[in-house]
């Protein structure tokens, strides 16, 4: 049951991150779900390392969304199309 909860959480957080940062991104709901899950892990790790909050507090959803936005920003920066120069 916990895996299903992470999947739903990841889908919601990933969708919010994609709504906050509009633009063309690859993938459908599975990539969105993975973005949310990994963003939640990154945001949770950073938030708890900085002692912003403790596990189980509602601010974790905000940090998960911020983590997904950071991950999406890094993805866009690394896959940006650059013109070829000779």
Image (cartoon, helix red, strand yellow):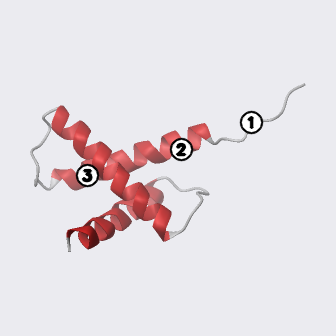
Which residue is painted at 29% across and 48% down in the image? 41
Q: Do callouts 2 and 3 mark residues in contact (Cβ within 8 Å)?
A: no
Q: Residue at x 24, y 70 (%)?
A: 5
Residue 85 in the image: state x and y as whole percent: 86, 27
Quadrant of the rendered image containing residue 53: top left
- The quadrant in which residue 35 appears is bottom left
Task: Name the residue that disc number 1 marks.
Answer: 82
Is residue 58 rendered to the left or right of residue 71?
A: left
- Classify residue 18 as left or right of residue 54: right
Q: Nearer the viewer, mark 2 or mark 3?
A: 2
- Tell me the distance, in whole angstroms, between the alpha carbons under discs 1 and 2: 14 Å
Front in this rendered view, residue 58 or 79: 79
Callout 2: SS: helix
**Residue toward you, 16 or 41:** 41
The residue carrying mark 3 is 62
Task: Name the spot of residue 86 as percent of width and height, x first.
Answer: 90, 25
Which residue is drawn at the image coordinates 59% and 38% (left, top)? 78
Q: Is residue 40 above or below residue 11?
A: above
Residue shown at the point (47%, 67%) measured from the top left: 30
Marks 3/1 in contact by CB < 8 Å: the verdict is: no
> In front of the other: label 3 or label 1?
1
Q: Rounded to the nearest whole Å, what is the CA distance between mark 2 and mark 3?
A: 20 Å
Q: Residue furthest right?
A: 86
For marks 1 and 2, the one nearer the N-term is 2
**SS under mark 1:** loop
Q: Position of residue 22 (x, y in %)?
A: 53, 56
What residue did someone put label 2 on?
75
């Amino acid at each position: 049951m916990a895996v299903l909860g992470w999947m739903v959480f990841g889908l919601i957080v990933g969708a919010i991150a994609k709504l906050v940062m509009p633009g063309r991104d690859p993938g459908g709901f599975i990539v969105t779900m993975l973005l949310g899950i990994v963003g939640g892990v990154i945001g949770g790790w950073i938030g708890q390392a900085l002692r912003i909050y403790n596990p189980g507090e509602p601010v974790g959803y905000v940090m998960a969304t911020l983590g997904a936005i950071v991950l999406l920003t890094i993805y866009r920066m690394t896959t940006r199309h650059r013109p070829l120069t000779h």
